[in-house]
Amino acid sequence: MPKLLALSLGFSTAVFALVCLPGGQWPATVGLACALMALFLRERRDWRTSAALLAAGLVLGLLYTGLYGALFRSPAEALASEERQEVTCTVLDYPAETSYGVRLSVKLSLPHAPDPKVVLYADSEAGGLLPGDVITTSAVLRPAGIYRGESSDYYPSRGIYLTGYAGEVTLSERPEHIPVNRWPQVAAKALRDSVRANFPADIAGFVTALITGDKSTMPTGLYAAFRRAGLSHVVAVSGLHVNFLVALLTLLLGRRSRLSAGVGMALVFFFAAVAGNTPSVLRASLMEGLLLLAPLVGREEDRPTNFFGVLAFLLLLCPYSAASVGLQLSFAAVGGIYLLTGPLCQGWLKLIPKAERPQGRFFRKAAVFLLSALATTLGALLFTTPLVAWYYRSVSLAGVLTNLLTLWAVSVTFMGSLIAAVAGIWLPGVGQALAWVIAWPARWVCLTARAVARLPFAALSLSSVYLVVWFLFAYGVALMCFFFRKKGVRPVIPVCSCLLTLCAAILMTAYPVLTGTLTVSVLDVGQGASALFTSKGHSVLVDCGGNSADDPGDIAADAVQALGTSHLDALVLTHCHTDHAGGVPELLGRLDVDLLFLPESDLDDPLRLEILALAKEHGCKVTSLSNDACLTFGDATMELYAPLGGGSTNEAGLSVLCEAEGFKVLVTGDMDQAVEKRLVKYKNLPDIDLLLVGHHGSKDSTGEALLLETTPEMAAISSGWNSYGHPSEETLERLGAAGCEIYLTKGMGTVTFTYKGPAKERN
């Protein structure tokens, strides 16, 4: 069906250009569409018809995206207002707990416009609502395309254009039975409840994410380990899960094509609804449905047409789903498997000798399975890794290894957990017995992910220009191998060249830090604080907290492991507020920390007690400071000043002065100007080179007395999205008047200062 292929390719390309590319970038868009068309139709002669349909698809995509925005998105966003307004909504799903109440998925009832979906935040009293309930409330509605003050495609890519903050919620109507179209949500809740009741607590969150895609109960540290180990796709329901489901169905029903196909399509689409109808699972369900349907209607599978036809259909449902990272990764993985897995398998299987003895046949089958799995993994990773690098600025080097180690366990866990969870709904005893058995392969997956994530170079941050250059070089080599694979090029040459250049890039990245007198990296942890001090291969971390999307403990651990080590000489906490210490539990789980320093204050604080318990568990020596202390690492000396204030935790925190060969750095934590004056009075502070500005740039910190006494040349402010106005204009003006060069993690990301001697360098 080349005609449908050309039309859907043009349509999809136009939608992607309008939604994802700034200004459309039409020359590049048309060029990409033509390149893809040439790739898939290079053997066909009807290129004129294909070109005409391609152009028609581009025009249709342009018109449809504009029309959809005018009919659906614009009217919804026009309802946004900072003033409260009375709204009537229908609840679409069970409430989800948040730190401050519940999150509701609702649909507004409007008299003369399409009813838009809204994510509504409400008090915990609304936690008893059911799908199908009709509620009324006064709410502040805001555009969903703005998150934490910045543009975000997360909700618009799911067809949600408004978020709301509700006041008192009133139940207006409750149907006698939950509507049929809400049954998938009922099934999802039943599965989640069954997993929580029947599975061991240590793997219940992972199992829930695996079979429903709901990662809310999965420990943050575990999900970060999955990402670092290249296994994040395991808990993002997509083609892998749908294939497992169809395999399970085939195992139960046999290969009776009509029955298996009919039941399979129904089950696959119901499963997609249970998993939330995300773009990735819808893609997998539609393509699997076409695969099951093809033999029944007497047609062979047409992969390119199915691929772009399904993509065009999803974009018809919601053009803004083109911005969904899940959809992009899902289609990239399938594209890689379609293009690369077959040729790789054919080449590798020729190397396996045929065997006549039973033992030989067994080993041959095992080798075929492993090589097929490896080819599939490589095909998917080669196409998805550039997207992962673009969106997350890191790549997993261990993905191939961890996928091979865990593929069998993931398939067993998924199918077994689904059976156990369903059985546990009606037969809890049977469900618990099955769950106990399935827990062991599930633990293997989690254990492997955590173990691999602890390795220094399991994943690479692409913050270094050397690593970016290596990444582009490696993909250039991969493309050359693909296009010239018939020329007899031996794989050992490109593989060795990529490994050697990778080692060189890592050494060039780490060398300035490992050999420099002092390097200070003010990490981008959002609204929080975390600074890594490194001297001659020794490292000390001052604070570890923030509200970034990633756990601040993972961000700090990544920075340390990028140096080729999983060891930290010391961790210094100025105080135990979440924005300065919230990432410590995850950090202690990933790194070996020798010493922990913290102030002797707020002794009953829950976070402090948790940190102390974990430090004891991990063998970390703890010192609670009520007097000054000194710490030496590499060529640097760090003075730890005991608390100088009383009252709030901010006033009773530590302050830090680090010096190496005359280069001096001061950290004041969250102390206010009154405590700063005591610091100036009692500690005889020297002139400093770098000031890590206190309290994220609050107007109550970094006063003139401190600036006049220390005369800093540079000032770094660690802040992110917040409702406090940090950094304040008053603080920025004081720093400017003092002659400081100002660097902000908000907007600039992690800021690194390297001192090698007389000259100072900033990256």
Image (tube, helix red, strand yellow):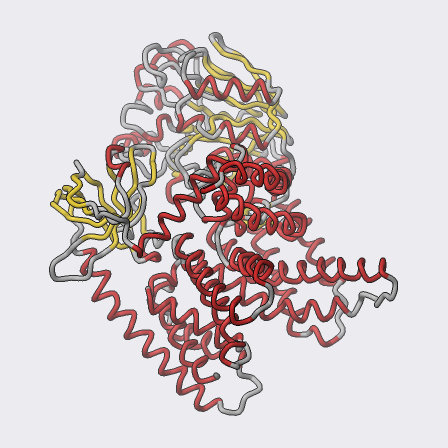
Residue in the foreground of this view, choosing between 393 and 348: 348
Q: Position of residue 543 (x, y in %)?
A: 47, 26
In the displayed structure, would residue 267 be above or below residue 577?
below
Residue 563 visible in the displayed image? no
Taking the spot 51% from the left edge, 17% from the top edge, the residue there is: 612
Q: Is residue 655 left or right of residue 384?
A: left
- Numbered circles on residues, count: 0
In the displayed structure, would residue 410 be above or below residue 314?
above
Residue in the foreground of this view, choosing between 625 and 754: 625
Taking the spot 49% from the left edge, 57% from the top edge, the residue there is: 238
Q: Position of residue 133 (x, y in %)?
A: 22, 46
Q: Is residue 668 left or right of residue 428?
A: left
Residue 300, by quadrant, is: bottom right
Q: Position of residue 553 (x, y in %)?
A: 50, 33
Q: Position of residue 662 (x, y in %)?
A: 54, 24
Taking the spot 48% from the left edge, 51% from the top edge, the residue there is: 236
In the displayed structure, would residue 569 be above or below residue 387?
above
Residue 224 visible in the displayed image? yes
Residue in the foreground of this view, choosing between 469 and 266: 266
